[in-house]
Amino acid sequence: MKETVEELEQAIVPLVDEYSNVSFKAFEDLRTWLISQITELIDRDFEHLLRILYLIDVNEMKVRRLIAENEGEDAPSIIADLILERQAQKIRSRKKYIPKDG
């Protein structure tokens, strides 16, 4: 998992930096920022959050199930972790299917 966290940091942090006015030094900074954005969406526009989750291919039923199973836990943290987990899956998948130079 450490390798995946490092890959996420390398792949996602610069991308988010590019499209936001926030700069991240580490993965945990990105996670904290993501949690704050999710909290705002939950409070202001939950349907928009669901559309975003759909676009980045995070399973809505999995989100709802995990929130229900972890009642009392911080829902934005659960959602942020699911987003980051999905991005890690995409990274691993791309690495697996990228042709090797030979």
Image (cartoon, rainbow, N blue to C red):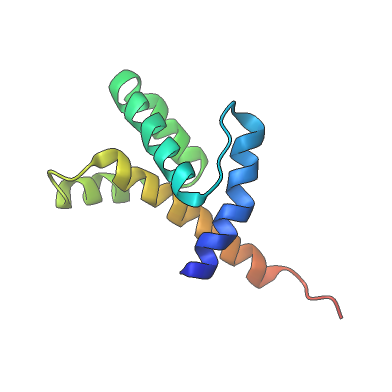
Q: What percent of the width, then of the height, locates residue 32?
A: 40, 40
| Residue sitting at x 59%, y 45% | 13
Identify the residue at image location x=65%, y=63%: 94
Q: Is residue 63 visible?
A: yes
Q: Position of residue 100 (x, y in %)?
A: 78, 76
Nearer the observer, 80 or 56? 80
82 and 56: which is toward the camera: 82
Q: Residue lying farthest right?
A: 102
User: Which one is in front, 25 or 42?
Assistant: 25
**Is residue 32 toward the left or the right of residue 65 in the image?**
right
In the picture as drawn, the residue positioned furthest to the top comes out as 44
Whether residue 58 can be seen here: no
Give the image quarter of residue 102: bottom right
Give the left or right position of residue 70, taking residue 38 as reference.
left
Tell how many labels: 0
Q: In the visual, does 24 lie left or right of 43?
A: right
Q: Position of residue 66 (x, y in %)?
A: 24, 51
| Direction front: furthest residue | 25
Residue depicted at x 38% and y 44%:
80
The relative height of residue 6 versus residue 62 in the rendered view (above or below) is: below
Residue at image point 66% right, 68% down: 95
Q: Position of residue 29 (x, y in %)?
A: 46, 43
Q: Nearer the viewer, residue 86 or 84?
A: 84
